[in-house]
Amino acid sequence: MIPILLIFFSSISVVAGPAYPTATDETRQVIIEKAQESIESTFDPEEYRFTLSARWIPGSLLKAQPEHVRSVKLQGTVEQYTNFEVLYLDGNSIEQVQIQLKVEAEQKLPVPNQRMMSGQTIEPDDLSWRWVPVRMGRDKPVRGMEELAGKTLRRTVIPGQPIHHSEISTPFLVEAGEDVDLIFTEFGIQIILTCEARQNGAIDEEIQIYCKETRNKYLGTVKGPGEALWQKTH
C-alpha cells in the first residue's frame, strides 16, 4: 500500500492561492503617497510632477499598520534622495522617524524642436513645451519661453533638451573680426588701444582680443558696443 500512496501523493499538484499585499506593502504605499502629497504641496503641479520610491525605511515603521501613519513631511530640499519625517502610532505613543525616498522629477519646460547650433538666435517657433526629466537641486534650466526668445546659443543643443542660463547670451555687442576699443585703467590713467576681437561677446562676457600695434593677445570684458575692459595680457 505504501508505494501506491506515494505514487498517488506525488501526482497531486499544489495550486498557490492569489498573492495579497501584506501590511508592510500597504504601509510602504501609504508612506509614499503621503510623501508625494507633501512634495506636491510645495511645487506647482502645472510645472512639476514626481515619482517616488522607497530607498530606506526602518523596519519598525513598516511593521506599523497603514492607518497608524499620521503624517509624512518633507525635510529640507528635494533632491534625488530626499529625507522625510514620519509620525506614526506605536501602541499608545506617537513615534517620530526619518526616512529617505528616491525622487524622480519631471519639469514642463520650453525645449528646442530640432537641433540648434552654437551662435544661432532662438525664435519662439524653435521651441515647444514638454515634460523632461530634471535633477532637483542641481539643474537650473530656463523656465520661461520669453527668457529664451531672441537670445543666442553658446553651444549646440539637441531636440527636447532643456536649455540652461549658462548656455545662452544676450545679443553680441562685439563681433569676432571687428575692431574693438580695449580700455586700460590704472592709477587714474586711461589708455585706449584699437584692437581686433577674436570672439563674439555680449555684455560682461570675456573675449580674446589681439592688438597689431603691440603684437599682444589680451583678455577683455565686453562693456558696450565695440568696447572691452582689459583683464589680463597673455
Image: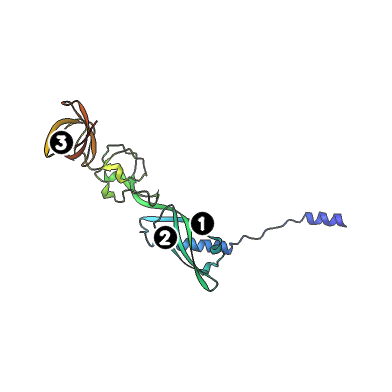
Judge left or right: residue 139 versus residue 148. Answer: right
Judge left or right: residue 220 versus residue 59. Answer: left
Q: Name the residue under label 2.
A: 75
- Measured from the top left, where is residue 87 in percent x and y? 48, 67
Q: Count up the numbered dots.
A: 3
Earlier along the polypeptide chain: callout 1 or callout 3?
Answer: 1
* Above or below 13: residue 154: above
- Amino acid, disc 3: Ile
Considering depth in this image, is 71 or 221 the residue closer to the camera? 221
Looking at the rendering, which quadrant does residue 26 occupy?
A: bottom right
Residue 185 tag number: none
Residue in view at x 32 percent, y 45 percent: 164
Earlier along the polypeptide chain: callout 2 or callout 3?
Answer: 2
Residue in view at x 53 percent, y 74 percent: 92
- Measured from the top left, where is residue 15 in percent x and y? 69, 58
Considering depth in this image, is 151 or 177 the residue closer to the camera? 177
Earlier along the polypeptide chain: callout 1 or callout 2?
Answer: 1
> Gap between marks 2 and 3, in whole Å?
51 Å
Q: Name the residue under label 1.
A: 56
Mark 2 secondary-structure assignment: strand
Q: Residues within 10 Å of mark 1 (few under 14, many from 20)?
A: few
Mark 1 secondary-structure assignment: strand
* Above or below 189: residue 3: below
- Amino acid, disc 1: Trp
Looking at the rendered image, the quarter that the N terminus falls into is: bottom right
- Please report contact status of discs 2 and 3: CB closer than 8 Å, yes or no: no
Mark 3 secondary-structure assignment: strand
Q: Name the residue under label 3.
A: 183
Looking at the rendering, which quadrant does residue 117 occupy?
A: top left
